[in-house]
Image: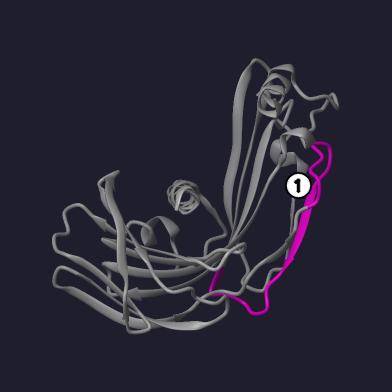
Amino acid sequence: MKRLLVILVAVLAGLVLFSCKSSTSPEDDFDIDVELDRDILVAFSSYDDFEETFASITVKEDVDGDVSLKVNGVEAELDFSYPAMGKVFHYFYIDYIEFGSTFDYEFQVGDIHHSGSIKHPDRYNANFPEFDINKDYTFDWTLRSNPQYQFLDYALDGEAGNDWKVVYDTVTLKPSARSYTLKKSIWNSLDTVEYMDFYLIANNMNRHGTRSTVYAYSEAYKEEDWEEWKTNKEIVPKGLQLLVNKHMK
């Protein structure tokens, strides 16, 4: 259970971060800031490493009423709820949803009721090579079928002169994309890259009017291991090495 809670917090943090970043080359009918700011946001995602599915309903605090969810006709059990950032997050236990499968859902928030079906995106098989600050970064992946939307979310942290700087963005990819290259010019303002992550997100979505959106998504990610971090001087910064040594004791 503790592991699941950690993952749920990570998913929430990812969605919030995702909503705060600008989108490059957005599709005409899709604005991530708008979609994540609906009164009601329903999300489903299955995990790569064990057979569980994350399910949540996020409701703005000014939307009153009881919250319920059914998946494939089965009433979902509410795990817990908590308020944050002007919204209330409700997490549910549901049966495992296979990657690539289509499932039915039904949700109700007060007098707002919607139902439909959606396909869970296929599982990513991603190849993220070792990062080198002096080179463009190219990675590739496979998906058995195209999702409706596909994104790359990235962040690189490091020293820039006497300051600490973060380089980040969300890139809208074609649904058919299976590789991508980040140009080294993106992080050329950094003297070191001390933390980095890349997230691929495959997303299918149903809108229900102007107030509710349902998501089903898959993800693949790369977080650079501390011992692999590279700098322009080909050494690990002293402060970072101290942290590495502390955590390896």
* Left or right: 100, with 72 as reference point: right
Q: In the depicted view, which residue is nearer to us: 12 or 69?
A: 69
Secondary element under disc 1, as helix, strand or loop, is loop
> Where's residue 124, x and y in %?
66, 67
Q: Is residue 81 above or below residue 143?
A: above
> Where's residue 115, x and y in %?
30, 81
The quarter of the picture where residue 125 lies is bottom right
Q: Amino acid at mark 1?
A: Lys
Q: In the depicted view, which residue is nearer to us: 249 or 183?
A: 249
> Where's residue 162, x and y in %?
65, 15
Residue in the picture at 82% in, 40% down: 132
User: What is the span of residues highlighted in magenta in the rendered image?
Assistant: 129-149
* Left or right: 126, with 215 as reference point: right
Magenta-colored stretch includes residue 130: yes
* Left or right: 159, with 210 as reference point: right
The quarter of the picture where residue 168 lies is top right
Q: Is residue 139 above or below residue 135?
A: below
**Residue at mark 1:** 183
Q: Quadrant of the C terminus?
A: top right
Q: Is residue 40 above or below residue 185?
A: below
Q: Is residue 27 above or below residue 4?
A: below
Residue in the picture at 16% in, 65% down: 66
Q: In the depicted view, which residue is nearer to us: 17 or 246?
A: 246
> Where's residue 78, x and y in %?
29, 63
Q: In the depicted view, which residue is nearer to us: 93 or 55?
A: 93
